Amino acid sequence: MRASFHKAAAAAAIIVVAGSAASQTVDLNDAVAVVGSGSRQTTVVVDFNSGGAVESIAYDIRYDGTATVFDAIAGIAAADPRAFAQFQSFGFGDIIGGFGFDLDGDGFEGTTVDGVLTSTAPIFRTTVDNTDPLDAGDLYEEGFGTPGNFEGFWSVWEAAGDPFDAAGPGWSSTFGISTTELLDGGYLGLNFDTDPSFSFTETPSIPVATGLTQLVFADAVIPAPGTAAGFAGLALAAVRRRRRG
């Protein structure tokens, strides 16, 4: 799997996918949450490719200075009790192993590997085959799998403008979540891809309204890029916030 990811990293650096054939726009009123505050803004699109009526959701991320893909996803999971992120470290860097969202509005309960969660603060662990949400009403996808049982993987995409607009810049695949910086006014896309050839041809689909109330976490802080201290602070803040709640 490591050799495959080295090949995937090389491929991801050069793939650009044009904007949608039909002009569409993301309505940030449909974003499930606004996370953070600041002068910069990035729209995060997460496409689970689950096949359900709602399989692609959006977050509205606000921050100052610079922030990385890791900062955004870790910040979402730490701030929003409906979201959960699992990361894994390799010799070439960190990856998003799993991501989940509470689609039925009763809180993200946990996974069949992590058990019932008392906090959705993001975690680092090895990915595990056939990991599912404890609540069938939640969305959760976890990548990789053992030989002969390929689970899929979370591909990462960026766009300087609206990638769903026919006149927009389109998606560009990227690699290195702890070094890739968010684009102010741009888009970050996560797409769960089940293609074992790592062709990076499937981009995130346009997010849809979930019917859930949009939450605002204005006090959430997207941490400085790549800092372990920032990550630990997010996790601690999330635990304290849930205890107070």
Image (tube, rainbow, N blue to C red):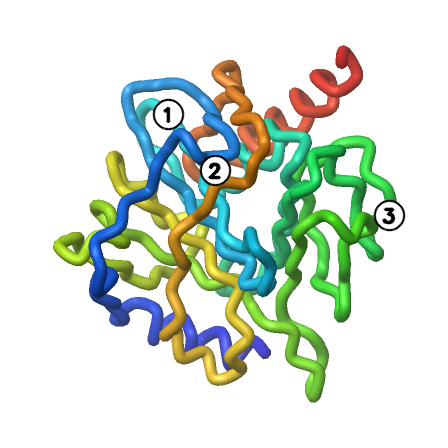
Which quarter of the image is occupied by the N terminus? bottom right
Q: Does the CB distance between marks 1 and 2 fall below 8 Å?
A: yes
User: In the visual, does 15 lie left or right of 218?
Assistant: left
Which residue sits at x=21%, y=45%?
A: 161
Q: CA distance from mark 1 to mark 2?
A: 10 Å
The residue identified by callout 2 is 71
- Secondary structure under tag 1 reads strand
Is residue 219 shown to the viewer in this render? Answer: yes
Callout 1 crowding tier (Cα within 10 Å): few <14, some 14–19, many ≥20: many
Q: Does the CB distance between marks 2 and 3 fall below 8 Å?
A: no
Q: Position of residue 208 (x, y in %)?
A: 46, 46
The residue identified by callout 1 is 63
Picture quadrant of residue 194? bottom right
The residue identified by callout 3 is 115
Amino acid type assigned to the residue bearing label 2 in the image: Asp
Which numbered disc, 2 or 3, marks the residue that appears first in the sequence?
2
Name the mark on residue 202: none
Which residue sits at x=50%, y=29%?
A: 33
Amino acid type assigned to the residue bearing label 1 in the image: Tyr
- Secondary structure under tag 2 reads helix
